Amino acid sequence: MLKKVLIAEDHEVANLSVHKTVKEFGVSEAKYVYYCDDALTWIKNAIRDGAPYDLLITDLIFEDDIIPQKITHGKDLIKAVKEIQPELKIIVFSSVDRISMIEDLFRNYQIDAYVRKARHDGEHFRDALKAVESNKIYQSPDIRLALRSNNSHEFTVLDIQIISSLSNGVLQKNIPYILQEKNIKPSGLSSIEKRLNLMKEVLGFTKNEQLVVYCKDKGLI
């Protein structure tokens, strides 16, 4: 269950709207900041205090103003956050519709959801919260359609190790131990589930077995 959420959004109206939706969803503690540097600091402090955030919601584009910042883009914030809290769930809520960037965020930054700011984004954002709470991958319908039409997935080292383990008969719940031995991150069970869901979603499969067969046919494992 999502209990503690941080929102990084530099437009006040959008920030307040997201904050309101998150509170209505039942989140007991929701905070918001306007700068990426502040978001990273709050996440570090929460880890230090032994009460880490469950979810980060962030935009990608942050406008420059009179206060200089070290981190000026949501993608860089996500990268920095994942280095200190790999299992933190992340929803990107942005107007950016560059499919190559969105693919990269799912593939290499292990985000959990991407909602594009557009018509019906309030509904899609609520759907994203429900999906992420259930440890599922979510893309708003227009993004999902674009990703599927692209019909491609660049397999990472993490992906290959997960699929190889399944192919060798390792139970999904035991794969984290293999990843930890090989120092492959993230290694949590929730991250493994998300990677499998993402690969199946992009490639149009419904079962892990189909994914294993596909990778064998392609010579990936």
Image (cartoon, grey):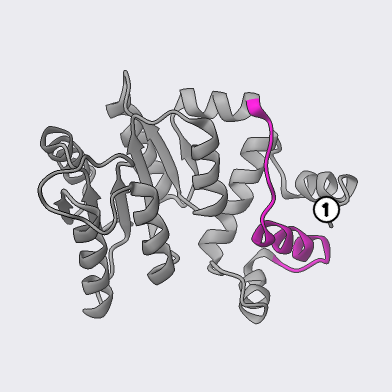
Total numbered circles: 1
Find numbered disc 1 in the image and state the secondary structure of the residue it sits on: loop
The residue drawn where x is 44% and y is 50% is 134
Image quadrant where residue 167 sits: bottom right
User: Image quadrant for the C terminus?
Assistant: bottom right
Name above or below for residue 175 compared with residue 59: below
Answer above or below: position of 93 versus 105: above
- At x 28%, y 74%, the residue is 47
Within 10 Å of disc 1 (Cα), the crowding (few <14, some 14-19, many 20+) is few
Q: Which residues are magenta?
A: 150-171
| Camera-nearest residue between 37 and 67 | 67
What amino acid does circle 1 point to? Leu
Is 83 within the magenta?
no
Q: Is residue 160 left or right of residue 45?
A: right
Residue that protrudes farthest toward the top in the picture: 119
Q: Quadrant of residue 124?
A: top left
Q: Residue at x 34, y 55 (%)?
A: 77
- From the viewer's side, name the closer residue of 25 and 79: 79
Q: Nearer the viewer, residue 201 or 117?
A: 117
Question: How far from the left and from the top, in percent, is residue 142?
Answer: 47, 23
Quarter occupied by the N terminus = bottom left
Specify whether 32 is left or right of 177: left
> Is 59 left, or right, of 186 in this rendering?
left
Q: Mark 1 highlights which residue?
A: 220
Residue 86 lies in quadrant: bottom left
Residue 206 in percent (x, y) is at: 69, 39
Q: Is residue 155 part of the magenta span, yes or no?
A: yes
